[in-house]
Image (cartoon, coloured by chain):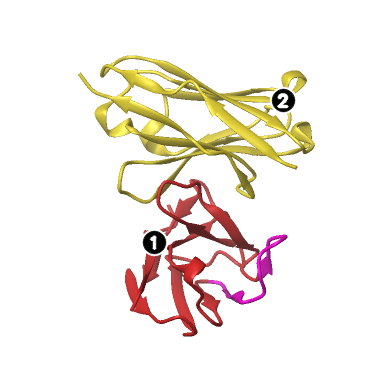
């Protein structure tokens, strides 16, 4: 059974940083593109970033370029999202996803002073 | 960016009704569309990929069609567990983009 478990969310002040993690199991992690998707409270879904199987390619939505970094550790079946220079509008539930076909339950990031 | 529009934004339907939700891409994206169901407080559940291929375990009352710019999700006979919000997604171009969602409510 595919399992994706996010962690690392919390309350942070504007300009602060957080590192989100996603522990994956039940599938060939090292052969799967991985994505982060977010959802602001009461809003729709927004794709944030993804990373190729070997970590050689990463893509981002414009609103997070230069502030967020996606990475992975295939030896530990783990996906990460480093969030820097956080803004109030980054407040959202962040979902880890395996090729957008399997999703975790999400972790809440709240940016507020 | 490829913009995805959805219609209607919401609809009211009765149990047993046939429901159709449309999604339009701002330019051609072949068949690179997925559909998701989301209930309050829950993660999105993938229903369809490749515009028409049912995800494993998804009941056959769900079906998808379309190619190019126009796509459709159909629920053949609405059941109580189907009341939710539905999103389309294009994965042909970067950034990936979702439609704004269609809320399906009980009439």
**Magenta range:** B53-68
Are there few (<14), some (14-19), or many (20+) residues within 10 Å of tag 1? many
The image quarter containing residue A91 is: top left
Q: Residue A42 location in percent, x, y?
A: 30, 48
Chain ID for red: B
Given residues B37 and B95, the one toward you in this image is B37
Chain ID for yellow: A
Q: Residue A71 location in percent, x, y?
A: 60, 23
Q: Is residue B62 magenta?
A: yes
* Residue holding disc 2: A77
Pointer 1 chain: B
Total marks shown come to: 2
Q: Residue A82 location in percent, x, y?
A: 48, 20
Mark 1 falls on what kind of element?
Answer: loop
Q: Do the residues labelled 2 and 1 touch (CB within 8 Å)?
A: no
Pick the quarter of the image with the C terminus of chain A. top left
Are there few (<14), some (14-19), or many (20+) residues within 10 Å of tag 2? some
Marks 2 and 1 on same chain: no
* Residue holding disc 1: B101
Q: Note whether A59 is above or below A55 in the view shown.
A: below
A33 horizontally vs B100: left or right: right
Residue sitting farthest toward the bottom:
B17
Disc sitting over residue B7 in the figure: none
Q: Residue B39 location in percent, x, y?
A: 44, 55
Disc 2 from disc 1: Cα separation: 32 Å
The image quarter containing residue B63 is: bottom right
Pick the quarter of the image with the N terminus of chain A. top right
Pointer 2 chain: A
Mark 2 falls on what kind of element?
Answer: loop
Given residues B51 and B10, the one toward you in this image is B10
């Amino acid at each position: 059974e595919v399992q994706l478990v996010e962690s690392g969310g919390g309350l942070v002040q504007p300009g602060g940083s957080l590192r989100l993690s996603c522990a994956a199991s039940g599938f060939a992690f090292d052969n799967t593109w991985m994505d982060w998707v977010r959802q602001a409270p009461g809003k729709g879904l927004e794709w944030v970033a993804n990373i190729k199987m070997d970590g050689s390619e990463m893509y981002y939505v414009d609103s997070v370029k230069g502030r967020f970094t996606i990475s992975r550790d295939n030896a530990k079946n783990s996906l990460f999202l480093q969030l820097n220079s956080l803004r109030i509008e980054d407040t959202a539930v962040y979902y880890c996803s395996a090729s957008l076909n399997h999703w975790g339950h999400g972790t809440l990031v709240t940016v507020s002073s | 960016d490829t913009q995805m529009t959805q219609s209607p934004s919401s609809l009211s339907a009765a149990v047993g009704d046939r429901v159709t939700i449309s999604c339009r891409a701002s330019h051609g994206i072949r068949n690179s569309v997925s559909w998701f169901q989301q209930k309050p407080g829950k993660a999105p559940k993938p229903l369809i990929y490749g515009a028409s291929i049912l995800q494993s375990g998804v009941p056959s009352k769900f079906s998808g069609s379309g190619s190019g710019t126009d796509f459709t999700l159909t629920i053949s006979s609405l059941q109580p567990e189907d009341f939710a919000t539905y999103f389309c997604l294009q994965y042909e171009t970067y950034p990936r983009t979702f439609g704004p969602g269609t809320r399906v409510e009980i009439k």
